[in-house]
Image: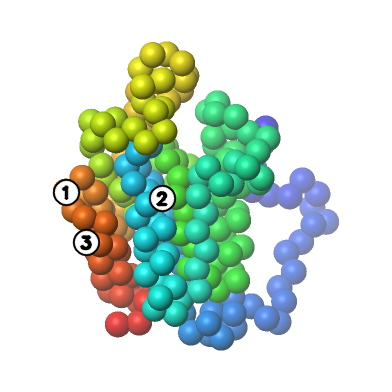
Amino acid sequence: MTTSLKPKDENIVWHQHSVDKEFRANIKSQKPAVLWFTGLSGSGKSTVAGALETRLAQLGYHTYLLDGDNVRHGLCSDLGFSEQDRRENIRRIGELAKLMADAGLIVLSAFISPHQAERKLVRDLLPEGEFLEVFVNTPLEICEQRDPKGLYKKARAGEIPNFTGISSVYEAPENPEIDLLAGDKSLDELVDQCVASLKERGVLAS
């Protein structure tokens, strides 16, 4: 399975249309961005991303939330959980997030995405400042205590191979744009932190 970002045929070219990203963003009165939530299973990525999307919608912003489990029901339903398939999963989501940002949306993506190289691949797809890495920084022991899907228990029993944090590595972000200490704060506090950071970076109006 290839992870090349270039078309196989040199006759395939990108068409620049008159209605572009800037136009689409202006009619929505917002700045496009991709908020990439990363963290261990059970860290709270989807919960925080969902609560933030609700807050942004209440404030009148146009958003879309991409969730790891949801995309595997369609776009990535043909992929497993090998290292190669997981890289391809992130590559596809990165390309989709890029298109949604091109539509002028604020995209929230909640994926474990355990490797720094994969997250950098998505970052490199987007203009400077448009990709914001959000580290849902929850310690493994807390994630394992929560274990909402019973996955850690199965992983410890050897029933799930290549499980991030147990039998497969998770490379924590070294310098995320937003670092959420999710084990120490309430959901409202985490959302407030995200909103404040987005205002500081000009994604949201002050």
Q: Which mark is residue 184?
A: 1
Q: Which mark is residue 189?
A: 3
Residue drawn at 56 percent across, 86 percent down: 27
Q: Secondary structure at mark 1?
A: loop
How many numbered discs? Answer: 3
Q: Which mark is residue 16?
A: none
Residue 156 horizontal/vertical position (percent): 35, 17
When asked about the image quadrant of residue 21, the answer is bottom right
Left or right: residue 77 compared with residue 160: right
Q: Which mark is residue 46?
A: 2
Q: Secondary structure at mark 2?
A: helix
Residue drawn at 79 percent across, 52 percent down: 10
Residue drawn at 68 percent across, 81 percent down: 19
Q: Which of the pair 92/143 is nearer the observer? A: 143
Q: Split into 4 quadrants, where in the image is the N terminus?
A: top right
Say which label, 1 or 3, has the lower sequence index: 1
